[in-house]
Amino acid sequence: MRKLIDIVQSTRERAIAVGVATYHNPIKVVKEHLEELALLADTAGADIIKNVIQERDKFDTATYVGKGKVAEIKKIADEENIQLIIIDDDLSPGQASNLEKELEIKVIDRSGLILDIFAKRARSSESRTQVELAQLEYLLPRLTRLWTHLSKQFGGIGTKGPGETQIETDRRLARERISILKKKLVQIKAQRSTQRKRRADKIKVALVGYTNAGKSTLLNALSNADVFVENRLFATLDTTTRSVKLEPNRVILLTDTVGFIRKLPHHLVASFQSTLEEVREADIVLHVIDSANEQAVDQITTVNETLHDLEIYKKPLIYIFNKIDKMDDRSLLKEFQRTYSPSISISASRSINLNALQKMIADSINSTFTEVIIHIPLNEQNILGKIYSLAQITNQKYTEEKIILSAKIANDQIKRVRNLLALHKNIILDF
Ligand SMILES: Nc1nc2c(ncn2[C@@H]2O[C@H](COP(=O)(O)OP(=O)(O)OP(=O)(O)O)[C@@H](O)[C@H]2O)c(=O)[nH]1
Ligand SMILES: [Mg+2]
């Protein structure tokens, strides 16, 4: 019996969520953030038993909340049999160890929690490598004499730290491992770029959005993919690309990838570069939104800011208001459509308005690119470099007397291509 209780207890942990409300971060906002923290905790395998919010001018530099609040949290933790304290902000390494010393239980901050979820959910060698790198980078400044085992920090919610191996806590070892992982990621990046070159002949469209918005559901609905879908945060960490037929003669490649979240740890963003490269390389971006979520507008802002940080802001983007079947107040949609354009409302799970969405993507491609065939006599092939700099070449064929290029040209470049080719009478441009 005792053993059974131990097992049950070790699978889910009882936790207290702690936030600080300041002038810039009022209590209403902190409450909403704690709701999201509870979802994150749930995904990681912990139940929030109680929320504790302190209103202060600013965070306490030593212990995040004030001394009195620390005592109050300790009292609740003892009474409620709590195993874990989750802080809604990022703690400095000093704050984390001070709090843990005073509370005598595990303390994990928001970044630590998200990293913990990523570590649990990473499946492919690529995402595992990226997560392990992010964890080690996060951990490195926290490796002091107090942190004698890596696993202690990532004892967070059940995990054993980066990788299953018994990783020593020694900084030197961590640094060595970091450099190995970075090299591995360089290789992965090279492989990906080769794969991408092979797929260069199709228009690439990427799904982005807040976690749980319905990106994978939409990919599944538009293609015959079978991507894992779940009503939890960060169901997807890897990229999946599938062909989607928009119109009889128009097939695109649609890519689903990792979702974003408020305060995404910067170590994660940095180490997920090879995954996010798929978005950077896309011709068109689809921003999927959970319209039924009360935080929809904040979530849109977070995603747009993250895209901006990733320097993805010059691409054509369509806002897709998903989950309209779940909305209580459909009048909100009108407001969304006024603010965010171009946009469309759909339900990915109920297949509502998907034909209209496909048409919209096709129209966006047609208004963004023109596909052309260029015939170049072999004795004029020194022009190739210039054409490559103006157009995206999707295919190149040689015959005995000429080179036949298939190319995608951004519409704002067409005039320049025409001007260039006008100087070469024997080169033929076919639309
Ligand atoms: N009611 C309703 N639920 C939906 C719709 N689309 C997706 N869902 C549900 O929303 C949840 C999240 O869907 P996913 O497709 O996993 O979301 P995601 O954006 O891929 O999420 P992450 O991979 O975690 O970033 C699942 O429970 C889906 O069944 C929709 O149109 N209507
Ligand atoms: Mg997903």
Image (cartoon, grey):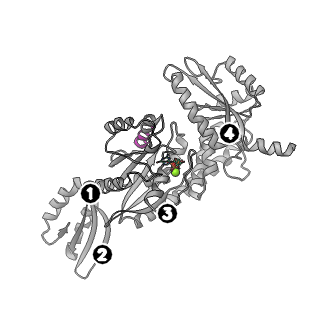
Label 3 Cα crowd, 10 Å radius (few <14 / some 14-19 / many 20+): few
- Please name the residue shown 25% across and 54% down the image: 367
Q: Residues within 10 Å of mark 1 (few under 14, many from 20)?
A: few
Label 2 near ligand 2 (CB < 8 Å): no
Magenta segment range?
302-309
- In this picture, residue 408 sits left or right of residue 120: left
Please name the residue that numbered disc 2 is placed on.
397
According to the picture, the residue beneath numbered tag 1 turns out to be: 366
419 above or below 90?
below
Residue 194 lies in the magenta-colored region: no
**Residue 30 location (% of width, % of height):** 54, 26
Taking the image as drawn, is residue 89 in sight? no
- Up-down: is 260 above or below 63? below
For label 3, the residue is 191
Name the secondary structure under disc 3: helix
Residue 409, x across and y down, in percent: 26, 59
The CA distance from mark 3 to mark 4 is: 37 Å
Q: Secondary structure at mark 1?
A: helix
Query: Is label 3 or label 4 in front?
Result: 4
**Labels 2, 4: front one:** 4
